[in-house]
Image (cartoon, helix red, strand yellow):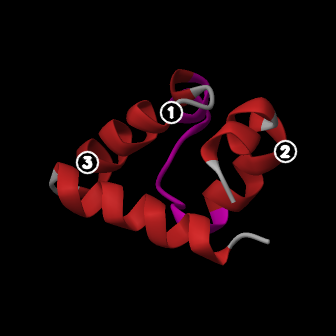
């Protein structure tokens, strides 16, 4: 799955994102608003991980979507 599809259908994907990253708040999801770089940044803040780890986590999550 490519990120353009997620960005275009952000509201539909927020549930799947919550399943994967339960610590994200409604405010976080509004801030992200479909932008991958914002998702990676919020993951870094919430989970205390580095940029490369956040990017890998998002890549791995994308691979699980059908």
Between discs 3 and 1, the one toward the N terminus: 1
Q: Secondary structure at mark 2?
A: helix
* Residue that mark 3 sits on: 44
Question: Is disc 3 surrounded by few (<14), some (14 to 19) or many (20+) residues within 10 Å?
Answer: some
Between discs 3 and 2, the one toward the N terminus: 2
Seen in the picture, residue 13 relative to 57 is either above or below; the reply is: above
For the point 62% across and 34% down, which residue is it? Answer: 26
For the point 75% across and 54% down, which residue is it? Answer: 15
Query: Left or right: where does residue 53 sit relative to residue 11?
Result: left
Q: Split into 4 quadrants, where in the image is the C terminus?
A: bottom right
Query: Left or right: where does residue 3 sit relative to residue 35?
Result: right
Q: Quadrant of residue 29?
A: top right
For the point 25% across and 48% down, which residue is it? Answer: 44
Does the segment drawn in magenta span residue 29? yes
Residues at marks 3 and 1, CA–CA distance in whole angstroms? 12 Å
Q: Secondary structure at mark 3?
A: helix
Residues at marks 3 and 2, CA–CA distance in whole angstroms? 23 Å
Q: Secondary structure at mark 1?
A: helix
Between discs 2 and 1, the one toward the N terminus: 2
Tell which tag, 3 or 1, sits nearer the viewer. Answer: 3
* Residue that mark 1 sits on: 28
Residue 54: image location, x then y, percent:
30, 56
Front one among 46 and 49: 49
Residue 47: image location, x then y, percent:
28, 57
Question: Is disc 1 surrounded by few (<14), some (14 to 19) or many (20+) residues within 10 Å?
Answer: some
* Residue that mark 2 sits on: 12
Residue 65: image location, x then y, percent:
71, 70
Residues at marks 2 and 1, CA–CA distance in whole angstroms? 15 Å
For the point 65% across and 67% down, which residue is it? Answer: 19
């Amino acid at each position: 799955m490519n990120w353009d599809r997620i960005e275009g259908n952000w509201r539909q994907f927020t549930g799947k994102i919550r399943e994967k990253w339960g610590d994200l708040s409604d405010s976080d999801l509004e801030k992200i608003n479909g932008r991958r770089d914002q998702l990676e940044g919020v993951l870094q803040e919430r989970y205390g991980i580095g940029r490369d780890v956040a990017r890998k986590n998002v890549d791995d999550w994308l691979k699980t979507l059908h």
